[in-house]
Image (tube, rainbow, N blue to C red):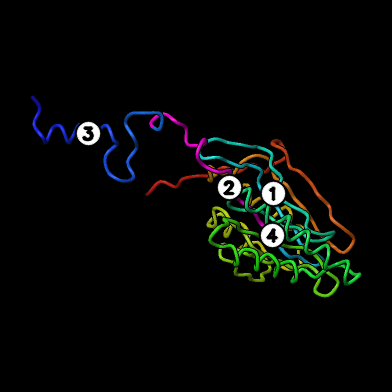
Amino acid sequence: RSSPASGSALATWKSGGGAGSVPALGPEAIAPDWESQEVSTGTTIVAIQFEGGVVLEADSRTTTGSYIANRVTDKLTPIHDRIFCCHSCSAADTQAVDDAVTYQLGFHSIELNEPPLLYTAASLFKEMCYLYQEELMAGIITAGWDPQEGGQVYSVPLGGYDGKAVLCHWGLWELLYLGLCRHYLPGRHDQGRVSANALTSAMEQDGSSRGVIRLAAIQELGVERQVLLGDQIPKFTIATLLPP
């Protein structure tokens, strides 16, 4: 005959303990996490302004829990002819926001009979992310070129705040910061190489970011897109210095 203490302990073990513990028995104990979690974009994304335009880069991995749902996702989405955005957080939420902003910006351009301003696109992203901040998990970097301001970069994180910057990066920020800020010069024309090196360094240390690197260079003449495959991605060696 078991004592009440041992009986309660057995019941606790069967129910999985207190709040937040993993069930010991039942289908929940063996169900993989990707069956209950949404698809996430990761992510490692970069946007840099240079003389004459902007460069956007992103990795290509999306995950569902610990499961890699897609290895070659395109996280650079065209919003208008010379306006692109990069995704972060929930894939479904960011795609829904992209579709809504693309629709509204297209009508706005038709009404004006001229290309829309990048500030207008950033304001639409900000409004969507702010109004639905309780329902959406969507972070956006939007960048591009317009006739008034030229190349610009705007960041719209969770909550709907928009900020203008010459460069913006999300991901393993320490390596991105070291790789971008130390080598950034406004007049450089090889910002794509600089950002690709920084993106690669961050991807190597981030388990949620891998795959190919997608680039988009946006200027007055148009958009040039490129994909860096495995053998074209820069290779780096991380050395550990031993104490003397």
Tell me where residue 13 appears, x and y as whole percent. Answer: 24, 33
Query: Residue shown at 72%/38% (left/top)?
Result: 229
Q: Which residue is mark 3?
A: 11
| Disc nearer the start of the sequence (2/3) | 3
Contact? badges 2 and 3 (CB < 8 Å): no
Q: Which residue is mark 2?
A: 42
Amino acid bearing label 4: Ala
Q: Which mark is residue 47?
A: 4
Indicate the secondary structure of the residue bearing disc 3: helix
| Disc nearer the start of the sequence (1/3) | 3
Label 4 or label 1, whichever lies nearer to me, is 1
> With respect to residue 93, does 118 lie above or below?
below
Measure how far apart labels 2 and 4 are at the Cα level.
Answer: 16 Å
Tell me where residue 241 appears, x and y as whole percent. Answer: 44, 47
Indicate the secondary structure of the residue bearing disc 1: loop
Range of magenta residues: 29-46
Residue that sits furthest to the bottom in the current view:
148
Q: Quadrant of residue 28?
A: top left
Contact? badges 1 and 2 (CB < 8 Å): yes
Amino acid bearing label 2: Gly
Indicate the secondary structure of the residue bearing disc 4: strand
Q: Would you call the spot at circle 2 few (<14 residues within 10 Å), some (14-19), or many (20 or more)?
A: many
Q: Would you call the spot at circle 4 few (<14 residues within 10 Å), some (14-19), or many (20 or more)?
A: many
